[in-house]
Image (cartoon, grey):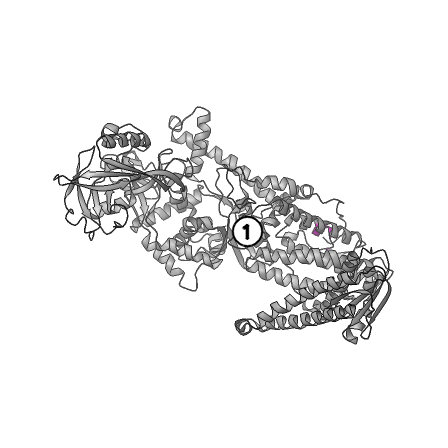
Amino acid sequence: MEQNEVSLPTKYDPNAIEQGRYQKWVEGKYFEAKNDKSKEPFTVVIPPPNVTGKLHLGHAWDTTLQDIITRVKRMQGYDVLWLPGMDHAGIATQAKVDAKLREQGVFRHDLGREKFLEKSWEWKDEYASFIHKQWEKLGLGVDYSRERFTLDDGLSEAVKEVFVNLYEKGLIYRGEYIINWDPATKTALSDIEVEYEDVQGHFYHMKYPLKDGSGHIEIATTRPETMLGDTAVAVHPEDDRYKDLIGKTVVLPIVGREIEIVADDYVDMEFGSGAVKITPAHDPNDFEIGNRHNKERVLIMNEDGSMNENAGKYQGMDRFECRKQLVRDLQEEGILFKIEEHLHSVGHSERSGAVVEPYLSTQWFVKMQPLADEAIALQEGDDKVQFVPDRFEKPYLHWMENTRDWCISRQLWWGHRIPAWYHKETGELHVGKEAPSDIENWYQDEDVLDTWFSSALWPFSTMGWPDENAEDYNRYFPTDVLVTGYDIIGFWVSRMIFQSLEFTGRRPFKDVLIHGLVRDAEGRKMSKSLGNGVDPMDVIDKYGADSLRYFLSTGSTPGQDLRFQWEKVEATWNFANKIWNASRFALMNMDNLQYDEIDLTGEKSIADQWILTRLNETIDQVTKNIDKYEFGEAGRHLYNFIWDDFCDWYIEMAKLPLYGEDEAKKKTTRSILAYVLDNTMRMLHPFMPFITEEIWQALPTKGESITTASWPQVRDEFHNEQASEEMKRLVSIIRSVRNIRAEVDTPMSKEIQLMIKTSDDTIAAELEKNSNYLDRFCNPSELTIGADIQAPEKAMSAVVTGAELYLPLEGLIDVEEEIARLQNEWEKWNKEVDRVQKKLSNEKFVDKAPEHIVQEERDKEKDYLDKREKVEARIQELKS
């Protein structure tokens, strides 16, 4: 603002300052990408949250990081697009809508597909509204004019284009395969929808009798009910125990079917008996072995997990009831001879909690090998996707190198319906973006596509693809950075990369910034069962969005998990409160300063020169660390500058000219306060958007909103290394005097004598020049500065760079206690000397570290040696 008419309320109340601010940003269209060709584009697409519920802390963390990146880039002059949207989340949403309907006594199949989909859209609208409110409370600067949903018309067009294209290339096919099956929701599951738990189960040892009556072969299984679908027994071809049995047959107990003993390299000779039962319809490895040996696939279960007609007398039983009865029957026949306790990992449906059944099913698949090869090759070139931290490229490549064909069909109603039709009489298959013209003779595939199929297209389908001429697609794709958690690298990041390469010929994003999971204070994963979840909206209600955002963005390093701790959020609120109070003081003393009256050309005090230097250093460090996505480090530099340098030191020192009589000094100080606060608020804005906008609006600034203000720049003319060194010395002296006063319980209000012995006359002159600060902050009855001062006998002392301090405190000092204190100080400096000398004696460090870093360590060594020597001399003086 050009006019400094706004003052800040006395108390920092985050809820009051955050109220209504977001609406002003949105109404001002500050977050909308402007397609301004004079600017370089910068694009981020939001990982679309599922419309299954409200956002959790992980979402808050993920989106806060994106908001920081995009706010910084907008201020740096980029044409920023942060594209928002949501995911239809097939299985999860359908399960939620199903459950809600069941509570009303209504079942999906009673409603029919069309009515059920109407209810699902109602659910989507309700929960999208919740998510929008949460985005608002977090202050996310997304471009609502370009918001997308994975089931909207444009994305549906992209999905059909990709499906048909891959089918015509032979990369999508329909076939029988073992998939993860959820008997509760009666649908296929992707690997990510299966959660594994260690379960105490059993190993059941059985004897399968040889057909020729010459004996038996032993096998063991954790799922005895699947034996009803056995079509072979496999042994290793080099296992001497079974070489004579290969090609013979055994009689499958209970069923009576003859099955062959086959040789296959897959079998582990060292495990168990070295012989395994083969059930091609109910185990993925058995499926492959069965294929190699041309064995029948006998499916023994229905989709709901009950036993079918192939299970004989067990037909109609639940799979686990069948297991119990079958075990009793096998024991009675003497087939089952041993049951062992066995702890093993069992897959459960993430959505229903049901035990997942490996199940033979006719599904649609993507042939992955050619797509994965292309994605792997990308990482060998200059245009690779950069993982941050780079260690996450390894699990990405591992997933690509070991990928299986991707089951993409789901037995659901909510989702992208598969664009395939079957002729009612001939069974002929038609795959296309449009239905056959004589539609009355065809029926469409009932299944929908896996949710990941549409979200894999997210970076380009949201931009208008497959229209190659779409303005946003040509302007904003590929995107610049994706922010996501390490838990979905294989399932989402990987799929976006290979689909983007296949259909656009380009990587979908330059960088992938990986973060971890939000855990509780004890490091446990947040879950409903533990009751340790925290609603981000509750945190905002208590401490404000700025406090939550700053904590989330600075509380960990890239790739690491984050522990949520209420006390740390409260500490961030205290930080915001400190900023508020410092800004109030500055504004109260600006005397209605106007933007065009800010003048930084006047004579500057040492404090003025120092704070401008520190501002330069902070701008440099914050910018560099944000560019590296090191938000914790950027936040640390900001915190130290604001709390220590600006609030604790500069504002206190600024009171001298502000409360003095020199009008020129007052004007310079007000101008520096305004300039430093303006630039500090700009740097802090991406982390804490609400409080910074409120303060910035009250400052003498130029522009409508801090969201569109330019990013701070280092100004070389304000950099003064000498002033910085002088100020550091002053601060060290003042701190040392305060510490000594505290040790001998002498309050600041009581005057004391202060003697400063300098190492040379230059430092003495420098301290004399700035003695007004020493008078103000040390309160000496008498201040003596010089290079030739003699140390008094009974005095407290301290060593700072370039000087020694003496405080003659007759009657207040205990010589023995002072020697003990100095001894501790000597130990401190001795440790520092030891540490730095070890570093400098390391040839690798000296040879490989940048020259200025090595020189910094040498300067430290000299300083620490000098301090240790002076403390040692003082100890000897007191002892003599």
Residue 845 versus residue 540: which sits nearer the camera? 845
Q: Residue furthest left?
A: 212
State how many labels appear: 1
Residue interval drawn in magenta = 695-702
Q: Residue at x 28, y 29 (%)?
A: 325
> Does residue 189 appear left or right of residue 78 in this picture?
left
Residue 130 versus residue 152: which sits nearer the camera? 130
- The location of residue 142, given as percent across then percent down, is 56, 48
- The location of residue 797, given as percent across then percent down, is 78, 65
Q: Is residue 447 above or below residue 708?
A: above
Residue 699 counted in the magenta span: yes
- Judge whether residue 860 can be spotted in this image: yes
Q: Residue at x 20, y 39 (%)?
A: 208
> How many residues crowd mark 1 within 10 Å: few (<14), some (14–19), many (20+)?
many
Q: Residue at x 38, y 57 (%)?
A: 375
What amino acid does circle 1 point to? Gln
- The location of residue 238, given as percent across then percent down, is 20, 53
Q: Dot 1 corresponds to which residue?
A: 66
Q: Is residue 373 above or below residue 429?
A: below
Q: Secondary structure beneath disc 1?
A: helix
Figure quadrant of residue 10: top right
Q: Residue furthest top?
A: 105
- Judge whether residue 599 can be spotted in this image: no
Figure quadrant of residue 670: bottom right
> Does residue 324 appear left or right of residue 843 in this picture?
left
Figure quadrant of residue 111: top left
- The location of residue 435, given as percent across then percent down, is 33, 40
What is the quadrant of the C terminus in the image? bottom right
